[in-house]
Image (tube, rainbow, N blue to C red):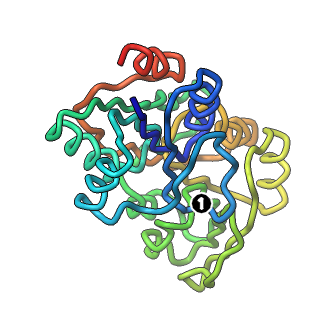
Amino acid sequence: MTLLLLAGTGEAQQLARHLADEGRAAVASLAGATRAPRAMGLPTRIGGFGGEAGFLAYVAEAGITAVLDATHPFAAQISARTARLCAAHDLPYCQLLRPEWVPVAEDRWTDIAAEEEAAAHIPQGATVFLATGRQGVSRFANLDGRRLICRVVDPPEAPFPMANGTYIVGRPPFSVDDEISLFTRLGIDWLVVKNAGGAASESKLTAARALKLPVAMIARPPQPEAPCVATVAAAMEWVRAL
């Protein structure tokens, strides 16, 4: 058996370590969104597959016999395509999808379905922290009249696409105290966050709660109808049962 681990999350890092410790034949795959990704501890390929045909060609060439999808919950197109192709070619597939964040009584969340909906809730003149990554920042173009700040892992190669925005560079993890200090220093009035779930990046929500900041929470996209687990332990049980 040779497992293909679709990576890019903290859970994928943990899975890679477990797979290596157990001596299992596996290859990790990263999309290449981060320029200097952390070592996975497994043979790793970086970059896209080149569409459906490229994915199937790679699976055949590498002798892949199962796929464990531990990509980001918002990598919906990748997960949907992979699940569909695996089903069509009788290739075992499982998605590791961590639970969503759920608000508590002190939170001030506004649920939105897409980035473009944030403008209906965030007032003019607000300073907005976009904790959503660089790839979709142009979808906030209708947030004119607000100051936008987007945190990215790598130094940007191009300027912010709108005149009212800027990037700041920071590599996680960030503590709650770090986030409180940053939001206070920048004068943040609103957060915009994707509901990615997970403990590793929850500190920004804890900081927002402490500062009583409102949060526009972007709902997850639909996930594939396929075998799914919620924890690293359950994912490893799936691997061991293959």
**Secondary element at image label 1:** strand
User: Left or right: where does residue 8 sit relative to residue 76?
Assistant: right
Please state the horizontal and vertical placement of residue 99, each as a whole percent of the image.
47, 27
State the quadrant of the C terminus.
top left
Decide: few, some or many residues near mark 1? Use Cα within 10 Å; few <14, some 14-19, many ≥20. Answer: many
In the image, residue 231 lies at what x, y percent? 50, 22
Task: Judge left or right: residue 242 versus residue 211.
Answer: left
Measuring 58% from the left and 25% from the top, which residue is drawn there? 23
Residue sitting nearer the eye, 182 or 37? 37
The answer to whether residue 10 is above or below residue 37 is above
Picture coordinates of residue 144 (x, y %)?
A: 51, 77
Nearest to the observer: residue 123 or residue 118: 118
Residue ID at (54%, 62%): 32
Quadrant of residue 65 within the rendered picture? top left
| Amino acid type at mark 1 | Leu
Which residue occupies 69% across, 49% down?
A: 38
In the rendered image, the quadrant that contains the N terminus is: top left
The answer to which image quadrant residue 9 occupies is top right
Residue drawn at the location 55% of the way across and 70% of the way down: 124
State the residue in front, 209 or 54.
54
| In the foreground, 92 or 81 | 92
- Name the residue that disc number 1 marks: 130
